[in-house]
Amino acid sequence: MTTMNVLAICGSLRAASINRLLLHAAIRLSPPSMEMVMSMDIGALPLYNPDLEHCVPAQVVRFRTQVAATQALLIASPEYAHGVTGTLKNALDWLVSFEPLANKPVALLNASPRVHHADDALREILKTMSAELVEAASITVPLLSSSLTEDEIAGHPEISIAIVSALFELKTFSNHRT
């Protein structure tokens, strides 16, 4: 059995972000056949500027290298003002026309059932960028306004089962493509 590499990307810069906790719990719950790592801090990326495409900044090269080295992406992000966070949108802008993203499986974790504008927009952005959105692996986990820790998220019976099932769906989808 080959190991599947997954890059987890958090659209929030907050240290105590529930989305970051959700991704860390997913990393802990990932099966032995899946190696999942957290991406670099996407807040370190410079603002997207197409004029820099001929001399891509080092942070962008590092981020693109992380994306290219994985078989799938797992993204969790909050919604700000009914939209995708500027930080996540900027990171995705650096991946527009980046060939290794084309047809790459992507799963979305949504930490709030009330949040749908950013989730809908993120789905549209990823489809436009030719990423392969894995619907069966994209789930909503009702964590907003909870005070659960990473340990409690990973140990919560319903939440952990939902995360493990989503990861299974992402792996199954990817296996059927190879």
Image (cartoon, rainbow, N blue to C red):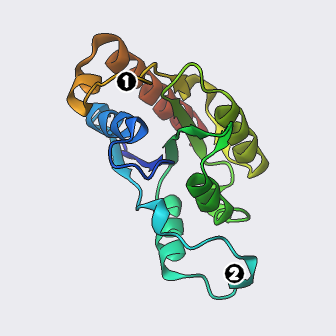
Q: Write the residue at 63% across / 88% down.
A: 55
Camera-near label (1 vs 2) is 2
Q: At which x and y percent is residue 11?
A: 51, 48
Pick the residue in front: 161 or 3.
Answer: 161
Q: At which x and y percent is residue 137?
A: 53, 27
Quadrant of residue 17 within the rendered picture: top left
Crowding near pointer 1: few (<14 within 10 Å), some, many (20+)? many
Quadrant of residue 159 within the rendered picture: top left
Residue 74 sits above or below residue 134 on the image: below
Lateral position of residue 26 relative to residue 130, left or right = left
Q: Are marks 1 and 2 in contact (CB under 8 Å)?
A: no
SS for callout 1: helix
Q: At which x and y percent is residue 102?
A: 68, 54
Residue 159 sits above or below residue 46 on the image: above
> Which numbered dot is residue 53?
2
Task: Decide which of tag 1 and tag 2 comes sooner along the chain.
Answer: 2
> Which numbered dot is residue 164?
1
Pick the residue in front: 85 or 154.
Answer: 85
Q: Write the residue at 70% across / 32% down.
A: 117
Q: Write the residue at 46% across / 25% down.
A: 166
Pick the residue in front: 165 or 33.
Answer: 165
Mark 1 → mark 2, Cα distance in angstroms: 38 Å
Three-letter residue code for mark 2: Glu
Q: At which x and y percent is residue 41?
A: 41, 61
